[in-house]
Amino acid sequence: MLLIIVLLPLLLGTLATLWLGSKSRLLTALAAGLVTLASLLILVSHAPTVMAGGVVMNSWQWVPEIGLNLVFKLDGLSMMFAGLILFIGLLIVIYAHFYLSPKDSVAKFYSEMMLFMAAMLGVVLSDNLLLLVVFWELTSLSSFLLVGFWSHRADARAGARQALAVTGGGGLAMLGGFVLLGQIAGTYEISTMLGQVAQIQADPMFVPALLLILLGCFTKSAQFPFHFWLPDAMAAPTPVSAYLHSATMVKAGVFLLMRLYPILAGSGWFEVIVTTTGLVTMIFAAFIAIFKHDLKGLLAYSTVSHLGLITFLVGLGSPLAAVAAVFHVLNHATFKASLFMIAGIVDHETHSRDMRQLGGLYKLMPWVATLSMVAAASMAGVPLTNGFLSKEMFLTEAVVGTAGVWAWLVPVAVTLGSVFSVAYSVRFIHDTYFNGAIGDVPNKHPHEPPLGMKLPSMLLVTMCIVVGLLPALTFGPLVDVAATALAGQPLPEYHLSIWHGFNLPLLMSVIALGAGAALYFWLARGKWLHRISSEDWFGPATGRQMFDGLIDGLFALSGRISIRLENGSLQRYLAWMFGAALVMAAIPLASTNIGTGDRVLMSAPVLAIAVWLLLLATCVAIAFTHHERFQTVVLVGVVGLVASLTFVSLSAPDLALTQLSVEVVSTVLLLMGLALLPQRSPKETKPVHRAGHVALALAAGAAMSGIAWVVLTRDFESISWYFLQQSMPMGGGTNVVNVILVDFRGYDTFGEITVLGIAALGVLALMEGMRTRRPLADPDGRPWTFAAQPLLLRVAASLVLPLALVFTLYIFMRGHNLPGGGFIAGLITAVALVLQFMALGQSKAEALLRADGGRRFVVWIGAGLGIAGLTGVAAFLFGRPFLTSAHGHPHVPLLGELPFASAALFDLGVYLTVVGATLLTISVLGTVSRETPAPVQSSGSAA
């Protein structure tokens, strides 16, 4: 299955490398390599079908209601890109083992690399646009982690943030384009859209969709003017640059252009925008690359230029341009990955990448220099290399694929870009290995690196020569099936060969080689080139200053807005929120005459009136005593109690028990949080403020009451009958509430427990390391006592815990058929354990729970979310949508026939998450004020 190709690095690769990272660096690299090799072998096993012109499709439903399904497609195009991802990835695994220093965490590196590899595989294999977006954003997140791998360096952190901002913003725009495209076509399956091209392009929303999708492609593949993030991402370790910025991430945008070409091309808009952007990017980036002094900086702008070349070819739209584009994708990956690895070797040996300091390395590192010269020759398009062949095809298409004024302007432009390409290629070699003796580098005695570090580059450089000599026998078959998938039609006859005779493209190549070398040596005379700063000369054009200016402007604007709106006053925030809500609700209702409906009203029982009066009195008390924070918390608990009684009266014991448990836990958490603040909140100094608050509160309350009255006095059609009828046959349980939570609306519940876990981890992140002393006395001057907890409380707690756990088990097990379930059981367990904290003190309670400073609670949260998620994923194994539950009545020895539903495992995940999140929050809040203050000498009574 194609899904296994993605899951191997996503699950097995990440987990294995994380686990082995602390045990053995060699085993970690070996695990990453074996996982990558396994995925590559599975991919190769499908090669006979694909090379014969077939397509492999696998699909599973996920969230079919919104069109999001697991649909994977392997054709020539996706096979080529997946093969690049895995093959280059395998070489990078080997290279990184020798490159990373003992101080670098191999667990962190290889696990993040496995995550990124899986995300890229998901992008190129997805046939569902929404699924593609999921993997697309995962590439942005995982690349953010990889670029910022050396998090102690400011440039790495800045480069990671910039890359995430640009590519993430483009991904958001692309999502909008995909949604529009899906709405036009009525499907998000790319294969289905291929039969609706005319309908799609005739829709008025096609052009907006196209522009948004192209924005996502251009930001990902660093096309002008979004190119600047790629050079700044060179702060990443060289294995990251060699992998992400030669064969994978930066080619994601190019891949998407190719994948959607049959759908988007032909309208005129696509061709004009894509060819123009690609041509401008190619020339501009190649020119800037000449003046970059950093080896990786030069290669970064070279990558941007070559991506522009491929983009230009895709935009031309001819079948042979598709062949040239696909061929250059392969060739660029071979020579650019090897050059990045060589740049890392030079940096590894000399501790410098500054070409102004390098020089004379040919005598010290002849093998590396030879590899560099061959790879750079391929990058420049020197004959007998693979780069020469694809660049010849590029020049040919630039000549024959244009007409009118463009028939001479485009060939001149691409020749100029080729001149710049040769110039920076010559500089890469001359400034690094020749140009005098080695300069002022930290290590003046570099030497050849270990064979394992050179081996990946040697293999790639060998491919540059072999493909250059035998293109039809090596890359030819793969190029043919990939280009056919790109063009969406059979290709005309063509030949991949070394010699095509004397023609204009050959003349353009000769001019580029000669003029490029001459341009470099003219600039390098007297080392004048070394004195040119690209940022000083071309700073605004490189884009970084534009981006920094935009970010600074946004921060300044947000700062001005924050100063006006965010002054630390909760009253002001609530006033804005309620005021805005009132205005927005009043606008549509002002022009209507909505009043009391015609539903027959029931008479209110005396008990209900009494409860309402209690609620009213409590709310009034809260309004008048809200400055007393502890007292207010207790009164708010009365409101929760009234809500519980309401649920009981409406025959909803599940909700009543849940509400009651939530009130207990939230009251404890609020009291612990408020203990860190003054017991009394400050009073408003101006009566006008109090009057305004009263008016706003009354208006908001009246509005909510009015809306509730309007709704409840009207008849409505309930959907509860559906759940009542289907709860048993579809969910396997008679407790409709629980079946809804874990089955019908299980996806919602999964999201809710995820938010709960994130909230608890957020408390940990915000308050970890924070410490505050407990107050010595209350506001009335009475000293606090920190004596041991009362004996009666300790004895009661010791009895309550086992009883509560037994009751928890009972509530949990019956939850699918009777009131109960994992959420309620988790709250009961949390209440019982909170009582242990109160009776024994935090230190002793956590010692008995072996909490390890709260880390165990984090593990509980992770285990709960993991169990819940895996329960949902397990449905895929049976061809069912995510979180589809199975149920039956298995026969258990001694116990007989028992009702069982797989949703019980999901409920177990809910239980663990609720308990872990509650105890983690309590642990963090308690730790903040754990220190005991000095004893207070006072004759007053203890508070």
Image (spheres, rainbow, N blue to C red):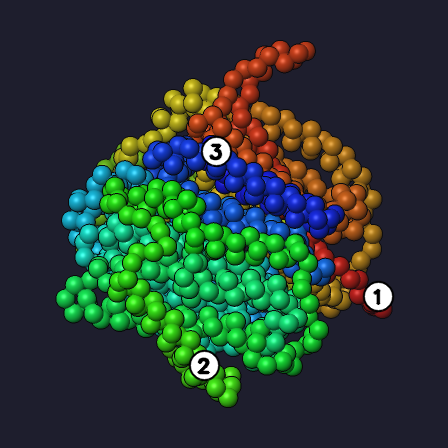
* Residue that protrudes farthest toward the front in the picture: 501
**Location of residue 336 in the rendering, given as x and y in whole percent from the top left corner:** 48, 60
Q: Quadrant of the C terminus?
A: bottom right
- Residue located at (25% from left, 68% from top): 411
- Asked where in the image residue 416 lies, by quadrant, the reply is bottom left
Q: Amino acid at mark 3?
A: Ser
- Residue 424 in the figure: left or right of residue 348: left
From what the image shows, is residue 363 above or below residue 669?
below
Tag 1 and tag 2, C-beta contact below 8 Å? no
Q: Amino acid at mark 2?
A: Phe
Q: Which residue has dot 3 on it?
A: 45
- Indicate the secondary structure of the residue bearing disc 3: helix
- Residue located at (73% from left, 68% from top): 781
Tag 3 and tag 1, C-beta contact below 8 Å? no
Residue 662 visible in the snapshot? no
Q: Amino acid at mark 1?
A: Pro
- Residue 298 in the figure: left or right of residue 843: left
Disc 1 crowd, CA 10 A, few/some/many (<14, 14-19, 20+):
few
Q: Which residue has dot 1 on it?
A: 935
- Residue located at (44% from left, 69% from top): 301
Disc 3 crowd, CA 10 A, few/some/many (<14, 14-19, 20+):
few
**Location of residue 264 in the rendering, given as x and y in whole percent from the top left corner:** 25, 51
Frontmost residue, 244 versus 441? 441
Q: Which residue has dot 2 on it?
A: 521
Residue 377 visible in the snapshot? yes
